[in-house]
Amino acid sequence: MGSCTLSSGGVCVILLALACCLTCACGAVKALYVLGDSQADVGNNNYLPQSVLKANFPHNGIDYPGGKPTGRFSNGYNFVDLVARSLGVPSPPPYRSIRSNELNSSVYLKSVNFASGGAGVSNLTNMGQCISFDEQIERDYYRVHEVLEEQLGMREAKAHLAKSLFVIAIGGNDIINHVLFSPVSELLRSRDEIVTELGETLKRQLQTLYDRGMRRLFFVGAAPLGCCPLIRQLSPTKECDAQANYMSTRYNDAAIVLLRDMSETHPDFTYSFFDTFTALLQSIRDPEAHGYKEVKAACCGLGDNNAMFLCSPASLYCENRTSYMFWDVVHPTQITVEKLMKIAFDGSAPLE
Ligand SMILES: *[C@@H]1O[C@H](CO)[C@@H](O)[C@H](O)[C@H]1NC(C)=O
Ligand SMILES: *[C@@H]1O[C@H](CO)[C@@H](O)[C@H](O)[C@H]1NC(C)=O
Ligand SMILES: *[C@@H]1O[C@H](CO)[C@@H](O)[C@H](O)[C@H]1NC(C)=O
């Protein structure tokens, strides 16, 4: 127990930890409970009439079975689908699509995805456009937890959750919004403070989930957000934005420290932190070696580098989606998440 904690550092350490968490230390996974942002959303935002942060229209889903848009911000599957596949369980349905069945816990016992595009650690991030991370936890997950306890009893609900895997991807939108919308005068002064604040909020949120049964966690760290087409486009030289990347690294450092602290405080808590930042940056620095032809432009969009607008039916899109790192201005292609999850599950990553 507690053996899945790890030191920060190379991707190798991290993926060994994931393999360990999921197989040797903890046994088979009963169910997946997924929280977070658009990387993980499989259609919850389709149910938010007032939100513009949606992906349930073409050309999203062009490589999904049937070529159908589902609400995933991707040309095909997202990383949660691949985690589920690797564990041999179905990809969890959006919570919003199964809410009407809530009196029957058998649905909740299987797996649930609470993630919502646009969500951030801070409940101010894209407020009103998404289901905030706090709402995902304190309203939606609490409800599921309550139903499980009512119908299974406390002890069995606890045992079920302890054998389940929680998957969380959150924090990127807080950083993107800060870089895009903060006054320049504030940027240098407050970015450390902002990351510290995010770390403190995240700590409260993860502790809350622990208190309600989370014992195994796969946490996906922030990507090198300064390199996504949206942020790159802001730079006169079209290089990766150093400030956004700095915030991603600092946020990841904060997350690693707090996860390590949690596993020391709670010996029954195990986690693995996936270092998306390192893995993607390696590909950005040497695209060819990692099978990419294009790591700067978005596949689907409009304008310079397809980076001026989100993917929509009016957008252009690239022919060969397996050679692009980015599907739209911020989201990875299916091939990119396939490469990332292969690193996480197979341990095939090169050391830094
Ligand atoms: C709950 O749903 C399952 C299948 O979805 C069904 O077999 C079971 O009878 C239902 N239980 C109740 C109490 O409705
Ligand atoms: C947002 O979170 C803060 C605590 O971080 C809380 O005080 C506040 O009430 C929350 N606002 C909403 C609208 O949920
Ligand atoms: C698409 O791109 C991949 C990766 O660069 C390459 O291996 C493949 O041959 C390309 N397919 C076509 C049809 O050009």
Image (spheres, grey):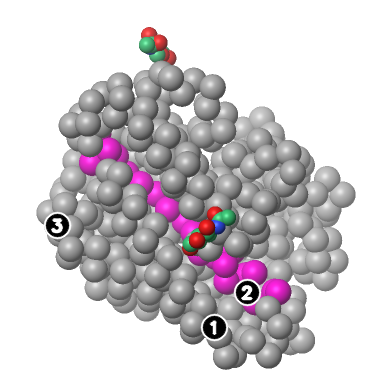
Is residue 106 on the magenta stretch?
no
Q: Quadrant holding ligand 1?
A: top left
- Graded by Cα atoms within 10 Å as few (under 14), some (14 to 19) or many (20 or more), the crowding at tag 1 reads some
- Kind of residue indicated by mark 3: Pro
Residue 126 shows in this picture: yes
**Which residues make up the magenta segment?**
160-181
Image height of 142 relative to 215, above or below:
above
Q: Earlier in the sequence, mark 3 or mark 1?
A: 1
Per the image, the residue denoted by label 1 is: 191
Identify the residue at image location x=62%, y=86%: 187
Label drawn at residue 267 = 3
Quarter of the C terminus within the rendering:
bottom left
Q: Is residue 252 left or right of residue 306?
A: left
Which amino acid does the dot numbered 1 rest on? Arg
The percent position of residue 93, horizontal first and vertical second, equals 51, 32
Between the residue at mark 2 and the residue at mark 1, the CA separation in whole angstroms equals 8 Å
Q: Is residue 67 above or below residue 231?
A: above
Element under disc 2: helix
Q: Which residue is mark 2?
A: 178
